[in-house]
Amino acid sequence: MPAVESAEFAVELDGHRLAGGALGEGTPIVLLHGVTATRSYVVHGSKVLARSGYRQLSYDARGHGRSDPAPEAGGYTYPEMVADLDSVVAAQIGEGPVVLAGHSMGAHTAVAYALEHGERLAALIVIGPVYMGFMDEEAVAGWDRLADGLERGGVDGFMEAFDRNLDPRWRETVLRFTRQRMLEHRHPAAVARALREVARSAPFEGMAELEFVDLPALVVASRDVADPGHPYAVAATYAASLPEARLISEEEGDSPLSWQGGRLAREIAAFCAAPAVATRLEG
């Protein structure tokens, strides 16, 4: 099998720059990561999509990874992230159908984009959503605690605040990959600000809006023991609310599907090859 090489790209916006990378040729699939993650943490370095005939694009959200912080007059709200995504699509893809696959914050951004620009999309992959149409004050307090830790003590301070109520079976794994991703950020102060602002921003008004997303959708849920921050019940609600959605997850007791980059990428590739999506991609 021939090697698939990554091509780095940058999208220059008004006041900030987004850093990204692309793999492969073919129908574009844009991968959107969660808050405190980077572009590597959707399919975790897998090249399966590129080797399956898709152009695999990902970028670091504003303030994350190698991307610049938000401009002086801007912030870290979902409308701003949707605008960033639209700029990436325009600069890197142009015309033609697009598939979006997002995890957590990226999942919410993808749904918000679908509500605004559904005509551009062929399909939607929603991985580990958490937003249910209202602000969860307990969750907001938790994000603030992580931001406080990052501001006070850098990565070590963040990890100290993060290491709470983790299941013993998964604790070492979770701590290891969480520290790894936190070390990838060039602008930790921007990540701390994003933690506070994303938690207080609504990607859309309420779950009832999802019935207007007229697209094939794949919803990826995690079991709560290993990944309680992305509740299974929330993903199931998204799957029930999106008109053309299918719900998948790992087996009880297995590592979350969202952590298994190669397997997740294969599920995405199979979903995109199915007639409901393939027909839209050919249109």
Image (cartoon, rainbow, N blue to C red):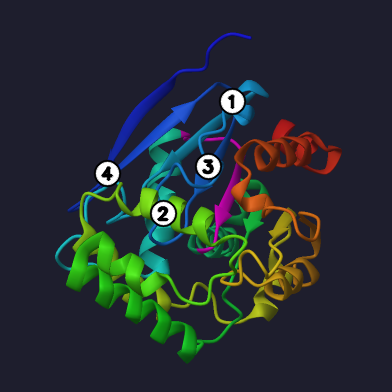
Residue underneath mark 1:
50
**Rendered position, 251 above or below 60:** below
Coordinates of residue 135 in the picture (x, y in percent): 49, 87
Q: Which residue is mark 3?
A: 30
Q: Position of residue 245 (x, y in %)?
A: 79, 59
Amino acid on which disc 3 is placed:
Val
Sequence-first disc among 2 and 4: 2
Residue 76 visible, this angle: no
Q: Secondary structure at mark 2?
A: loop
Mark 1 vs mark 2: in front: 2
Q: Secondary structure at mark 1?
A: helix
Q: Quadrant of the C terminus?
A: top right
The magenta segment is: 93-104
Mark 3 Cα within 10 Å, few/some/many (few <14, many 20+)?
Answer: many
| Disc assigned to residue 4 | none
Marks 1/2: CA distance?
Answer: 21 Å
Instruction: Measure the alpha-carbon separation of dots 3 and 4.
Output: 17 Å
Residue receiving disc 4 = 66
Instruction: Say which element carries label 4.
Output: loop
Alpha carbons under labels 2 and 4: distance apart? 11 Å
* Mark 1 surroundings within 10 Å by alpha-carbon count, few (fewer than 14), some (14 through 19), many (20 or more): many
**Label 2 Cα neighbours within 10 Å, binned few <14 / some 14-19 / many ≥20:** many
Outermost residue toward the bottom in this view: 137
Tell which tag, 3 or 4, sits nearer the viewer: 4
Q: Mark 1 or mark 2: which comes first in sequence?
A: 2
Q: Amino acid at mark 1?
A: Ala
Point out residue 189 in the picture as x, y percentages from the top left corner.
20, 64
Specify which label sits upstream in the sequence, 1 or 4: 1
Which of these two is toward me, 282 or 158? 158
- Identify the residue under disc 2: 37
